[in-house]
Every structure is written in structure tokens, then in C-alpha cells.
């Protein structure tokens, strides 16, 4: 049987509360360490960044990062794999945009648009007050607010600056350049000693 062609997944990680794995930096490292168990082969990881919680005052600062993973899983199965990693690290889904011990978002898979342009446009253009109350009941790719989030674009630009949004036609670097400087300045990198990710060579069995 011929194996399915691998897909390239862009994944955003975040945490601002302790989890069974420890503090947020330790939790992100633990999550990355479990990717291989779920057929998500880690190919690159950004630095970790500290970013303010949104909305302002809703909780402690977040630790954010992005990763590239290669997988033969279909996008829906890759999302389910991320949810299993979250659950294994104690994630219980409560308030939308609430503080959390771990959050793994499937940002994009290859250059796929899921499910269609009209549905994607509706969620992409949803007013902020509705974003805070409503969540789609199905997978959307790319993430409909990817282009608005410095805490995704800054780490993503370190590992996939040339990936191009299939609807907007802009690269990660171009989307980041269009964000207000004040939003970008709110993020700060965390020292490598605090958040060194798992060794990719060992995780992937590569040379």
C-alpha cells in the first residue's frame, strides 16, 4: 500500500497557566515532545515568546511559539491529534479565549482552503464581539484570524516566512509587516535557557 503524501502543518502553541507538566514553558516543551506519538513529525520550532493576554487583563501573560510538523494524517485527523495532546496535558475547554494551561491551534495545512472561500470569509470578517462568543463547529484552514495575530505571525516568521496565505495572497512576512508596530512590540522573546525545545534530530530520527 502506497503511503499518503505528507502534509506540512503550521501549528501555534500557547499557554498562560500551569499544567500537569509544569509552568507554561515546560508545558509547551512537553507538548512538542508528544508530537511524534501522534504521527506529527516535528521539523522546526520557533523561539518562545511572551505576549500579553487578550482581552487585556483576562489573565497572565502567555508563552507562545509556532512549529512545523510533517504528517500523513488528513487535516481533521491532525487536529484531533493536537486535541489529544492538549487533553493529555490537562486541557479542559471552558470559556472562549480564557486562560489555559495549553492551546494548540492548527494554523494551516499546505496551502489548503477548508471548507470553502465563503465560509472562510464569514469567519475571517466576524466582528470582534462575535469572535469572543462564537466558535466554528468545524475545521477552518487557514486559521481565520492568522493575519491579525502578532503572537502567531512573529514566531511563524522565524520558521515559515515565505508561506503564502491561499486567500489573501500574502506571505507570513508580508502579513507581519502590515501589523501595527505597537502590537509587535508587545511580544518579547524568552531566553533559550528557559525554553529550549526538544532536539529535532532525536525527535525525528534524522541525521
Image: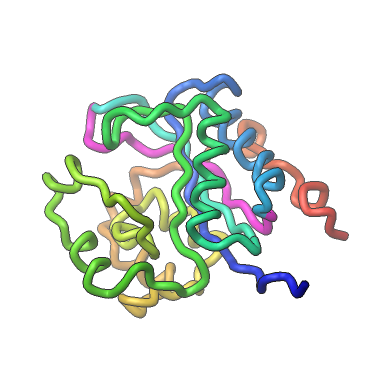
Residue visible at 55% across and 63% down? 74
Residue 50 drawn in magenta: yes
Q: Is residue 164 above or below residue 86?
A: below
x, y percent for residue 20? 57, 19
Instruction: Give the image location of residue 93, x and y in percent.
Output: 37, 31
Question: What scheme was used to colour the molecule?
Answer: rainbow
* Direction front: furthest residue: 1
Is 188 displayed left or right of 137 in the figure? right
Residue range highlighted in magenta: 41-57
Compare residues 6 and 11 and report the one nearer the observer.
Answer: 6
Total marks in image: 0
Q: Is residue 122 above or below residue 36?
A: below
What is the x, y in percent for residue 1?
A: 77, 72
Query: Is 93 or 99 nearer to us in this picture?
Result: 93
Q: Residue 160, percent across and down?
A: 54, 66
Between 62 and 139, which is closer to the camera in this rendering? 139
In-image side of 149 versus 11 (left or right)? left
Q: Residue at x 75, y 51 (%)?
A: 200
Question: What quarter of the picture does the C terminus occupy?
Answer: bottom right
205 or 90, which lies in front?
90
**Picture quadrant where residue 6 is located:** bottom right
User: Relative to 55, is 161 above or below?
Assistant: below
Q: Residue at x 19, y 41 (%)?
A: 132
Amino acid at each position: 500500500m502506497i503511503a499518503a503524501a505528507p502534509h506540512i502543518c503550521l501549528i501555534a502553541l500557547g499557554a498562560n497557566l500551569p499544567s500537569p507538566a509544569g509552568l507554561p514553558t515546560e508545558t509547551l516543551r512537553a507538548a512538542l515532545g508528544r508530537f511524534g506519538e501522534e504521527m506529527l513529525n516535528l521539523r522546526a520550532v520557533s523561539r518562545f515568546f511572551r505576549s500579553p493576554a487578550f482581552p487585556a487583563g483576562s489573565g497572565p501573560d502567555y508563552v507562545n511559539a509556532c512549529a512545523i510538523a510533517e504528517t500523513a494524517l488528513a487535516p481533521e485527523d491532525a487536529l484531533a491529534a493536537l486535541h489529544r495532546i492538549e487533553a493529555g496535558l490537562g486541557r479542559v475547554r471552558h470559556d472562549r479565549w480564557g486562560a489555559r494551561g495549553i492551546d494548540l491551534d492548527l494554523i494551516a495545512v499546505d496551502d489548503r482552503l477548508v471548507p470553502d472561500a465563503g465560509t472562510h470569509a464569514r469567519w475571517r470578517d466576524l466582528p470582534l464581539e462575535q469572535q469572543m462568543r462564537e466558535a466554528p463547529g468545524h475545521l477552518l484552514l487557514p486559521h481565520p484570524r492568522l493575519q491579525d495575530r502578532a503572537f502567531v505571525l512573529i514566531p511563524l516568521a522565524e520558521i515559515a516566512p515565505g508561506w503564502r496565505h491561499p486567500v489573501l495572497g500574502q506571505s507570513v512576512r508580508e502579513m507581519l509587516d502590515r501589523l501595527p508596530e505597537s502590537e509587535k512590540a508587545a511580544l518579547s522573546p524568552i531566553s533559550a535557557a528557559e525554553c529550549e525545545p526538544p532536539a529535532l534530530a532525536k525527535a525525528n530520527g534524522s541525521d
